[in-house]
Amino acid sequence: MNFNRRRGAIALFITLGVILSGVAITLSIGWILLNTRRLAIDILGIILFAALVAGVVLYTVFLVREVRRNERQDSFLNAVTHELKTPIASIRLYLETLQRHPVDEAQRQRFYSIMRSDTDRLIATVETVLKAGELGQRERVQQRTRIELYPLVAECIQTVLHRHHLLPETITLAEVAGQVRLYVLGNAEDLRTAVMNLLDNAVKYSPDGVHIVCQLRIEDYTWVVLSIVDTGLGIPPDQLKRIFKRFYRAPTNDLVKIKGTGLGLFLVRAIARQHGGEVRATSEGPGKGSTMLLKLPLSVDKTTTDS
């Protein structure tokens, strides 16, 4: 009977041990599963929170950019309005003067000259705006021809001298070293627009006197570089890259008001990139002038290249 009791006690303890072991195992597995789920929920929560924070940051950045872009667009619209309204008002004033009052021939010719300059200013503004829209929609594949740069730059210089009523010595073009004829493959009208904008910009930012030196040279045997050096207001270091953005205009002091639409240098950069080149600006700082460098791929043709 004692034996039977012992066997019963052993069976009881064995059963109790099995039950306790099962409970321990169940609790352990349940604890692990429970913590795993909570960890997964925590991780998912962290990911969602990080995504929410990232969304807020991106939205804020986007909002700030849109605000700045709208400010630049408003500034652009004001500048374009001024660039259009001022010469129109001037032309109308001179026309009314010619219509209502008798003037001698010399004064009449002076009025005609002023009105023609105002007309050129209007045309330049309209062409700049139209060109900006055209470059934004134009396909990259274009019909291009070989263009000699030196005559093109010389022609642009003469146009700028006439437009701004400058003496010939204010803008000079150095001879190419070795009298090499430098060609590029591109669109003549676009390249003329780029060079004209660089020259106009150099003139506008030289309020105390225009002195501009232009030079063409070969770089690394594969590039043509046009450098336009002025002695004007200069560019702060933090503005050297920003000035090529659409609608952006470098800040000036209160004593100097520079007219413009904020599209000129943007057009230059767009044209340079479409031709496989680049444009960049260098300056030692405000009041120390600036240098614009237009870099384009050199086009070589053994049958037409002169040395």
Image (tube, grey):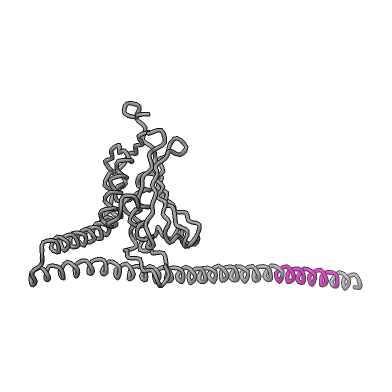
- Name the quadrant containing residue 234: bottom left
- Give the prevailing secondary structure in the magenta stretch: helix
Which image quarter holds the N terminus?
bottom right
Specify whether 103 is left or right of 157. Answer: left
Residue occupying the point 25% across, 60% down: 125
Residue occupying the point 43% across, 36% down: 222
- Between residue 54 and residue 118, name the one nearer to us: 118
- Between residue 47 and residue 84, name the one nearer to us: 84
Q: Is residue 15 magenta?
A: yes
Tell me the magenta residue range.
9-27
Residue 290 position in % (x across, y down): 44, 55
- Between residue 73 and residue 243, name the one nearer to us: 243
Q: Residue furthest right?
A: 2
Specify whether 251 is left or right of 143. Answer: right
Q: Is residue 70 magenta?
A: no
Residue occupying the point 88% across, 73% down: 5
Specify whether 303 is left or right of 120. Answer: right
Q: Residue furthest top?
A: 303
Which image quarter holds the C terminus?
top left
Specify whether 25 is left or right of 86. Answer: right
Q: In this view, does 78 lie above or below 274?
A: below
Residue occupying the point 23% across, 66% down: 84
Residue 18 position in % (x across, y down): 77, 68
Residue 122 position in % (x across, y down): 22, 61
Residue 241 position in % (x across, y down): 45, 58
Q: Is residue 224 above or below residue 195?
A: above
- Between residue 187 and residue 92, name the one nearer to us: 92
- Name the quadrant containing residue 15: bottom right
Query: How many marks on residues?
Result: 0
